[in-house]
């Protein structure tokens, strides 16, 4: 009986060891020589398709730099704002690099690396609109992409009684602004400034700041080694200036000084 018990215990340890090894996502990625990265390709200039229908943008080049440094092939996992976290939770993606801002609510269900970039979240309106503060938005409908931090932030402002019009993704929301269906949108300052490029007759500008967010890489919970390796990579590429170069190339400004130091 004692021998049988010992054998059973040994078998259990082997099974646990196998499960632990399988749970080490970093080792699995390096062994496969491929990383599945969830990125929205419809939110210029962070993610988009170029004239040759190849992915480009600041998040795309950040992901490509990571894959190059780690010697990996990228498998792109297309996403929208609302599906980024589910892609991690359902194991469709290994990481999310897609303007994913760090919030306490999201940190309850996924893990975040240290910040690799930042996002200035604003309400932007037509340049001609007389909007100087929140009170000037009371009678205006604000377009917002469903499931984003802007959606969460504005929805929580019950006392301001803001009128929100939700769209499934940033591309549809921007199209609404470009085509005249929306005169105000809640998104990043960079996207607001892109609207006038698409339609010079409808120039938008940031009007009311919401909040500045750190952008980080999203990782499934319980993967400390992957998170540690990503943090090491971010630290090195902030120090050598490569992440700042990517950000400046697409956004026209440098990363905050405290992030680059």
Image: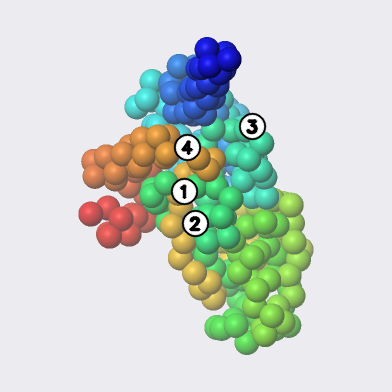
Q: For mark 3, does the 10 Å Cα neighbourhood hold few (<14), some (14 to 19), or many (20 or more) residues?
A: some
Determine the residue positioned at 70% across, 65% down.
143
**Where is residue 41, by image quadrant?**
top right
Q: CA distance from mark 1 to mark 4?
A: 11 Å
Mark 3 lies on a secondary structure that is: loop
Q: Mark 3 — residue?
A: 92
Q: Mark 4 — residue?
A: 223
User: Mark 2 or 3 closer to N-term?
Assistant: 3
- Left or right of 182 on screen, residue 93: left
User: Mark 2 or 4 closer to N-term?
Assistant: 2
Mark number displayed over residue 112: 1
Q: Is residue 76 above or below residue 106?
A: above
Q: Mark 2 — residue?
A: 102
Q: Is residue 222 above or below residue 25?
A: below
User: Mark 1 or 4 closer to N-term?
Assistant: 1
Mark 2 lies on a secondary structure that is: loop
User: Mark 2 or 1 closer to N-term?
Assistant: 2
């Amino acid at each position: 009986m004692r021998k049988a018990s010992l054998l059973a215990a040994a078998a259990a340890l082997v099974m646990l060891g196998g499960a632990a090894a399988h749970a080490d996502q970093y080792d699995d990625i390096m062994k496969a020589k491929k990383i599945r990265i969830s990125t929205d390709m419809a939110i210029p200039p962070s993610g988009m398709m170029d004239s040759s229908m190849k992915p480009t943008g600041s998040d795309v080049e950040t992901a490509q730099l990571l894959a190059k440094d780690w010697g990996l092939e990228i498998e792109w996992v297309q996403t929208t704002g609302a599906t980024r976290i589910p892609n991690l939770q359902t194991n469709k993606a290994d990481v999310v690099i897609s303007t994913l801002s760090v919030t306490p609510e999201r940190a309850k269900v996924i893990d975040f690396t240290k910040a690799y970039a930042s996002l200035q979240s604003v309400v932007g309106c037509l340049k001609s609109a007389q909007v100087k503060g929140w009170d000037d938005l009371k009678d205006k409908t604000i377009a917002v992409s469903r499931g984003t931090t802007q959606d969460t932030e504005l929805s929580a402002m019950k006392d301001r009684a803001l009128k929100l019009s939700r769209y499934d993704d940033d591309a549809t929301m921007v199209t609404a602004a470009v085509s005249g269906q929306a005169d105000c949108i809640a998104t990043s300052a960079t996207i607001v400034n892109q609207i006038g490029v698409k339609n010079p007759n409808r120039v938008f500008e940031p009007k009311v700041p919401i909040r500045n967010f750190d952008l980080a890489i999203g990782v499934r919970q319980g993967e400390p080694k992957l998170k540690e390796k990503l943090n090491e990579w971010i630290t090195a590429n902030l120090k050598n200036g490569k992440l700042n170069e990517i950000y400046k190339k697409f956004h026209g400004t440098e990363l905050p000084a405290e992030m680059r130091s």
